[in-house]
Image: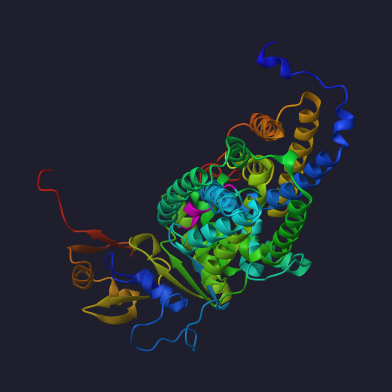
């Protein structure tokens, strides 16, 4: 009997898929995929990938702290992620400042997480599920919270969309045009915190990029139109979650692994298909009608 | 109109004051006959190193559209009239051919054209351009200068340009503003391009050369004694 014996095809996978815990996983995972896919474009254009990563870790002491005081894990995650997001958001627009602040907050949060975990004598299983997510253990209550968060994220994003794109890709001009760049930055980071609170419970702290960054990065290789990027990223995230759950039911392995693998695989395929980056040269110096004269004379 | 002076003289700060991004510590400021305020639609702005910040994630056309509708909250499609204005601005700067490409795919000169299209799309009466010729080769410098000259004539728009190298701009500059001995000055460009004044302004010997054809140049008047 080897450890690998656990990996085998389960012929009753269709039945597993229709069980209540799988239905919860499917709905919960889909909600997260929608919110994460929509935010991805902004995480990339605002160079916020590190903040996204850090927020996931900042949630860690929230989760272990909640276990310590006997509060719901989702509540602990939400409080820490949103507070961390606001702190990071307040540290201004300059990427260098933000990176340093984010790194410092991240270190402190992780230290707190370790402390809380040891104080609460949380078992390794709980810690593992925070780090790697446990989509199959999502409760009805968690689902309700996810639904509220996703509606809030999608609604707010729809309202902020245009100025947020402006402030993200072109902050200097946006500010001169009267767009409230700083307030938008803060609002965005709160939306990100809510999304990460959910995503952490699906794919875990360590694998979060697969839903927040990778689908949007893949979409950006295909198109640069923000609404299309959002649609493609959401589809890719949904596809990864659904495919991951089906594969997980088939071979009885953690869905996180398959969700992440599918997201990364689609990214690699698109990367391979679209090839290297192009940069244009100026058109030829001589104008075709007067080959011996410089253009425009 | 040129905004000239050495590094740190406050040229960019002057733009930020005019855009309402900074409050004036003292004194009074009027822009187009009114106190400066953020989000003034009568001003178009192209910041320094503008293109460096923009990456893969936006098409030229969408960037110009943001200059028109980017401040608007809520979901609403861009109207055909707005799209037509974007097209006109892109056409005016000769950028229609690559309007659907990403900013990152363009050359520096093309990016600068798109940035100017974004600044004029809302029919600004005043354009503030911070170092629009920096990092451009001679040909692109000339083309942008010619474009600015045409825009000024056609649309009767005032164009203020921060520039370190005056030479490529001399054919189109009519006036210049500068800060000398802590006092602001405004003069016709012919009055400003004088050896004595420029030498004093920049704190280093500056020569002015007028060729037989009537072309005007400024040059650093220092020579390497080793050569």
Name above or below for residue A5 compared with residue B114: above
Picture quarter with the N terminus of chain A: top right
Please state the horizontal and vertical placement of residue A27, each as a whole percent of the image.
Answer: 80, 47
Residue depicted at x 59% and y 61%: A190
Figure quadrant of residue B83: bottom right
| In-front residue for pair B134/A293 | B134
Q: How many marks?
A: 0
| Residue depicted at 68% across the width and 70% down the height | B73
Residue A226 visible to the viewer: yes
Give the left or right position of residue B20, taking residue B41 as reference: left
A200 vs A71, nearest the viewer: A71
**Residue at 57 percent of width and 75 percent of height:** B124
Residues rendered magenta in the picture:
B50-56
Is A290 situated above or below A250? below
Colour theme: rainbow
Residue A207 is situated, as x and y percent measured from the top left of the image, at: 61, 38
Q: Residue at x 56, y 51 (%)?
A: A68
Residue B103 visible in the picture: no
Residue A248 coordinates in the image, percent (x, y): 76, 30
Where does residue B106 sit, x and y in percent of width and height?
Answer: 56, 47
Left of B124 or right of it: where is B207? left
Q: Is residue A249 magenta?
A: no
> Which residue is at the far top?
A1
Residue A11 sits in quarter:
top right
Taking the view exactly as shown, the residue that stands out farthest to the left is B225
Residues A188 and B32: in front is A188
């Amino acid at each position: 009997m080897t450890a690998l014996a656990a990996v085998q095809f389960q012929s009753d996978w269709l039945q597993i898929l229709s069980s209540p815990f799988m239905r919860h996983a499917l709905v919960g995972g889909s909600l997260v995929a929608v919110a994460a896919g929509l935010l991805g474009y902004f995480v990339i254009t605002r160079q916020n990938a590190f903040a996204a990563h850090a927020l996931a870790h900042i949630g860690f002491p929230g989760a272990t702290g909640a276990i310590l005081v006997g509060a719901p894990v989702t509540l602990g995650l939400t409080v820490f992620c949103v507070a961390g997001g606001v702190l990071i958001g307040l540290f201004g627009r300059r990427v260098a400042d933000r990176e340093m602040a984010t790194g410092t907050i991240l270190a402190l949060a992780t230290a707190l997480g370790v402390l809380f975990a040891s104080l609460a004598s949380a078992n390794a299983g709980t810690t593992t599920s925070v780090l790697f997510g446990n989509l199959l253990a999502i409760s009805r209550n968690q689902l309700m919270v996810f639904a509220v968060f996703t509606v809030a994220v999608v609604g707010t994003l729809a309202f902020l969309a245009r100025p947020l794109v402006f402030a993200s890709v072109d902050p200097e001009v946006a500010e001169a045009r009267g767009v409230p760049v700083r307030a938008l930055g803060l609002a965005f980071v709160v939306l990100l915190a809510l999304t990460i609170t959910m995503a952490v419970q699906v794919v875990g702290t360590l694998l979060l990029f697969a839903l927040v960054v990778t689908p949007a990065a893949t979409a950006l290789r295909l198109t640069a139109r923000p609404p299309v990027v959002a649609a493609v990223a959401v589809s890719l995230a949904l596809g990864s979650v659904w495919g991951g759950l089906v594969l997980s039911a088939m071979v009885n392995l953690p869905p996180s692994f398959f969700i992440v693998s599918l997201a990364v695989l689609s990214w690699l395929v698109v990367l391979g298909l679209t090839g290297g980056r192009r940069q244009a040269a100026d058109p030829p110096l001589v104008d075709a009608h007067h080959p011996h004269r410089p253009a425009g004379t | 109109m040129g905004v000239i002076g050495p590094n740190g003289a406050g040229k960019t700060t002057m733009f930020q004051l005019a855009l309402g991004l900074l409050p004036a510590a003292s004194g009074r400021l009027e822009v187009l006959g009114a106190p400066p305020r953020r989000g003034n639609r009568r001003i178009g702005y192209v910041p320094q190193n503008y293109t460096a910040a923009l990456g893969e994630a936006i098409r030229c056309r969408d960037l110009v559209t943001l200059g028109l509708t980017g401040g608007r909250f809520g979901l609403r499609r861009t109207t055909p009239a707005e799209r037509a204005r974007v097209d006109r601005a892109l056409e005016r700067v000769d950028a229609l051919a690559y309007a659907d490409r990403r900013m990152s795919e363009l050359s520096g000169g093309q990016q600068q054209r798109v940035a100017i299209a974004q600044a004029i799309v809302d029919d600004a009466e005043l354009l503030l351009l911070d170092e629009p010729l920096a990092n451009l080769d001679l040909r692109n410098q000339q083309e942008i200068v010619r474009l600015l000259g045409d825009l000024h004539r056609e649309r009767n728009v005032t164009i203020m340009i921060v520039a370190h190298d005056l030479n490529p701009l001399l054919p189109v500059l009519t006036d210049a503003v500068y800060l000398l001995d802590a006092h602001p000055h405004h003069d016709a460009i012919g009055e400003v391009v004088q050896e004595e004044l420029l030498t004093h302004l920049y704190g280093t010997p500056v020569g002015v050369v007028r060729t037989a054809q009537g072309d005007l140049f400024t040059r650093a008047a220092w020579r390497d004694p080793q050569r």
